[in-house]
Image (cartoon, rainbow, N blue to C red):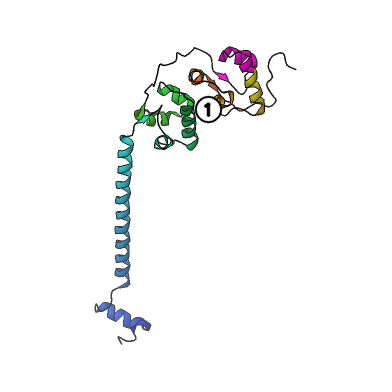
């Protein structure tokens, strides 16, 4: 009987009843317990990892005017485009003096402002440049008169800006600085004062042009 019980359901039941074979339900129960133990181990490992991550973030400090690409990406939801913009501005000599300038520059939503704020340090390396009180100018759509009044550029710079804008819209301050060859002091003065909207249909010509 023992030899042929695999093909004999009645023999299996007898062997299970006498304890010579484990019951299917018990074997299934053990499998479930093993799986639960494995899941618990994974959860514990995940919590430990999460704890390490939170601990690292808690001690994170970013020197805004000296941080490298890797530093920026440690901040929650800091995209590659954001990090690249900050590095380009830094390479162009641009410095930020406060959180509000950074938040306006990157157009951060409120929940990210709250998460970033405790980790930001603003050290100024040199004399700060006073900022003029000017209205926000849409670089890609403003008329030549609006650009002249808002940016305080001379006529030559305005014409260069319009020609470059005609070629393709400006993406951000770093792109604006690079293409117009502007010094860092001018770019610093424009932070929070300009934006780069999508170009409207049809070119925006300077006043007097047809």
Residue 144 within the magenta-colored segment of the rendering:
yes
- Residue drawn at x 55%, y 28% is 175
- Is residue 107 shown to the viewer in this render? no
Where is residue 177 shown, x and y percent of the image? 54, 24
Frontmost residue, 174 versus 79: 174
- Residue sitting farthest toward the right: 210
- Residue drawn at x 32%, y 72% is 24
Quarter of the image where one finds residue 196:
top right
Where is residue 30 shown, x and y percent of the image? 29, 66
Q: Which residues are magenta?
A: 136-158
Would residue 206 be found to the left or right of residue 42 on screen?
right
Frontmost residue, 62 versus 46: 62
- Is residue 6 shown to the viewer in this render? yes
Quarter of the image where one finds residue 166:
top right
Where is residue 86 shown, x and y percent of the image? 46, 30
- Residue drawn at x 30%, y 39% is 55
Circle 1: element type: helix
Q: Which residue is mark 1?
A: 174
Residue 63 within the magenta-colored segment of the rendering:
no
């Amino acid at each position: 009987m023992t030899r042929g019980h695999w093909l004999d359901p009645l023999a299996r039941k007898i062997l299970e009843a006498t304890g010579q074979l484990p019951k299917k339900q018990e074997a299934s129960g053990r499998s479930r317990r093993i799986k639960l133990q494995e899941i618990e181990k994974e959860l514990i490992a995940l919590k430990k990892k999460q704890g390490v991550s939170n601990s690292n973030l808690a001690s994170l400090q970013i020197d805004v005017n000296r941080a490298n690409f890797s530093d920026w990406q440690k901040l929650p939801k800091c995209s590659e485009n954001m990090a690249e913009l900050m590095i380009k501005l830094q390479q162009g000599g641009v410095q930020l003096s406060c959180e509000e300038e950074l938040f306006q520059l990157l157009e951060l939503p409120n929940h990210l402002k709250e998460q970033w704020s405790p980790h930001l340090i603003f050290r100024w390396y040199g004399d700060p440049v006073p900022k003029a009180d000017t209205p926000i100018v849409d670089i890609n759509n403003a008329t030549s008169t609006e650009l002249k009044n808002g940016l305080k550029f001379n006529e030559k710079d305005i014409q260069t800006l319009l020609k470059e804008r005609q070629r393709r819209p400006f993406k951000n301050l770093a792109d604006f600085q690079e293409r117009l060859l502007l010094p860092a002091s001018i770019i610093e003065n424009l932070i929070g004062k300009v934006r780069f909207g999508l170009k409207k249909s049809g070119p925006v010509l300077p006043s007097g042009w047809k």
